[in-house]
Image: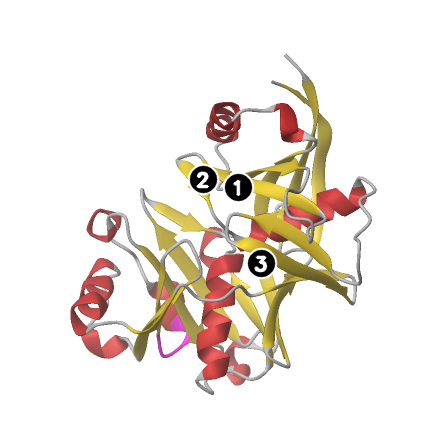
Amino acid sequence: MTRFSFHQVDVFTAQPTSGNPLAVVGGADGLSESQMAAFARWTNLSETTFLLRPEDERADYRVRIFTPFGELPFAGHPTLGSCHVWLAAGGVPKGAEIVQECAVGPVRIRRDAGRLFFAAPPLKRAGPAADEERAQAAAALGLAAEAVVAAHWVDNGPGWLALLLRSRADVLAVDPDFAALGDGKIGIVGPWDGARDGAEAQFEVRAFFGPGIEDPVTGSLNAGLAQWLIGAGLAPARYVASQGTALGRRGRVHVLKDGADIWIGGDVAPCVEGTVIL
């Protein structure tokens, strides 16, 4: 057995226990895929990541991302949390931006106003959902057809289908039928009303996937949503999304369009540091 550095951080919040937790194992080149998968099942967090030496000469480090059920090609909050741990351990990027290598390829990360931002990766599937897909998603969430303003694929790896609702209140009122959801991954988004909800954020987001999981704060979903909403003129070039409210969290996702790129950022709060023996 070997000792590896271990960190648990909270992503998309500056206040520990308010965002989305992530476990990070450093210097994990000596671990096999089965060991990584077993440890991710043991942590039982939505994601556990493993920092490795890069194979792509453009990258500063490589990351593998595991859920308790398998490996992901990309995910947002693991990207920001892993980068935070890599930098805190003394990582120095080769260029002005940090480049993370993962299964979807190189992901660019930059620092802005004390936060980390990743460049939203290209969508693997985009465009309006078919009528049958839209109806099935609405039914799984207990929504009447007229409650859904629009339904759009925003898949950058995990497989997200997004539904736009009329308000934050409508988003928070959703009570999904996870059995009907099956293996689907559905995100919902609705605008804040400044007079009623305040000005701290402009959108409310929730993310559902099987088996029976609501994710506290979801970088990949917010990246896909931003590409859709900004591209369609439904959101400004800079906005803040709130996520996790229904779970008692207070996640904040900062979105910025800069030229052709959309950047997804947030704070990262360290919570646990130590050693894991694997």
**Residues at discs 3 and 2 in contact (Cβ within 8 Å):** no
Q: Is residue 165 left or right of residue 87?
A: left
Q: Earlier in the sequence, mark 1 or mark 2?
A: 1
Q: CA distance from mark 3 to mark 1?
A: 21 Å
How crowded pointer 3 is (Cα within 10 Å; few <14, some 14-19, many 20+) is rated as: many
Amino acid type, residue under disc 1 in the picture: Ile
- Residue at the location (48% across, 42% down)? 46
Q: Quadrant of the N terminus?
A: top right
Please tell me whether residue 113 is drawn above or below residue 87 in the rendered image.
below
Which sits earlier in the primary sequence, circle 3 or circle 1?
1
Residue most extreme to the front: 57
Which numbered mark, 3 or 1, is in the foreground of this view? 1
Residue 129 lies in the magenta-colored region? no
At which x and y percent is residue 249?
A: 54, 53
Q: Dot 2: few (<14), some (14–19), or many (≥20) neighbours within 10 Å?
A: some
For the record, the magenta segment spans: 165-169
Answer with the quarter of the image where residue 234 lies.
Answer: bottom left
Q: Main secondary structure of the magenta part?
A: loop
Disc 1 residue crowd, few under 14, some 14–19, many 20+, Cα 10 Å: many
x, y percent for residue 103: 51, 48
Q: Amino acid at mark 2?
A: Glu
Residue hosting label 2: 71
Instruction: Confirm or deny contact between disc 3 and disc 1 (CB under 8 A).
Output: no
Q: Position of residue 154 (x, y in %)?
A: 40, 67
* Residue under numbered circle 3: 251
Q: Nearer the viewer, residue 60 or 130?
A: 60
Please name whichever residue, 235 or 106, is drawn nearer the observer in this view of the structure.
Answer: 106
**Residue identified by numbered label 1:** 65
Q: Are marks 1 and 2 in contact (CB under 8 Å)?
A: yes
Is 271 on the left or on the right of 164, as rendered? right
